[in-house]
Image (spheres, rainbow, N blue to C red):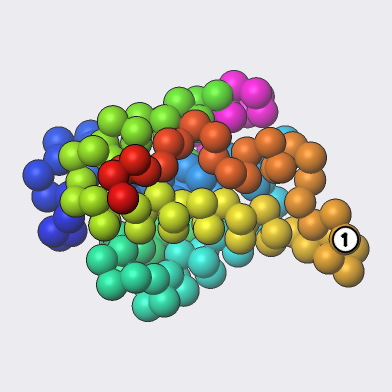
Amino acid sequence: MLDHIHHLSEEEKNLVLQAPVYVSILIAGADGHVQLEEQQRILELVHTKTFSEQYELRALYAELDHDLAAHLRHMLVSLPENTEERQDMLSGLLQRLNLIFPQLEKHFARQLYKSLREFAHYIAHADGGFWGISAVSDAERQWIKLPMLEEPFKDQD
């Protein structure tokens, strides 16, 4: 399993593992629905991060990569259809990471935070816009910096 989160409760472990998917749906669904191209980009990004991410996070993405397509489909149908309700729910789930970050090793918590922020950025740019212009919608722009998350250990440098 994942050495860096083994000491967390099952609920906390699940939240850490699901965080990239929650971020993905939050950003991709900000404009109302998660398009097929965005879903494909989510799958590609998670798979890429299984070998391109910092060593400590590779296991997290490898665990998530297993059967992600089915898991993503299930999650999309189980979340509220109303955009505002869905965004509030996902934001609330992600906000709970702020209570988990202090329980993690400092370096790992910072890597996880940075990875989630990068993931949001990549998903927001997945649609591409016209020749890269307006690639990020106004709705996505509201969420792209993940305002519900506080940078872990920020004051401990």
Of residues 14 and 109, which is closer to you in this image? Answer: 109
Q: In the image as oriented, which residue stretches furthest toward the bottom?
A: 51
How far across and how far down the image is residue 90, in percent? Answer: 50, 32
The correct choice, above or below, for 39 with respect to 81 in the image is: below
Out of 85 and 114, give the one closest to the viewer: 114
- What amino acid is at disc 1? Ile
| Image side of residue 131 versus residue 85, left or right | right
Taking depth in this image into account, of 105 and 42 the one nearest to the observer is 105
Q: Where is residue 121 in the image (x, y as percent from the top left)?
A: 61, 55
User: Residue 32, percent across and down?
Assistant: 72, 36
Quarter of the image where one finds residue 38? bottom right
Is 55 colored magenta in this rendering?
no
Is residue 74 at all visible to an observer of this figure?
Answer: no
Residue position marked by numbered label 1 in the rendering: 133
Find the magenta span and give its range. 77-87
Residue 88 sits in quarter: top right
Q: In this view, does 13 lie above or below 39?
A: above
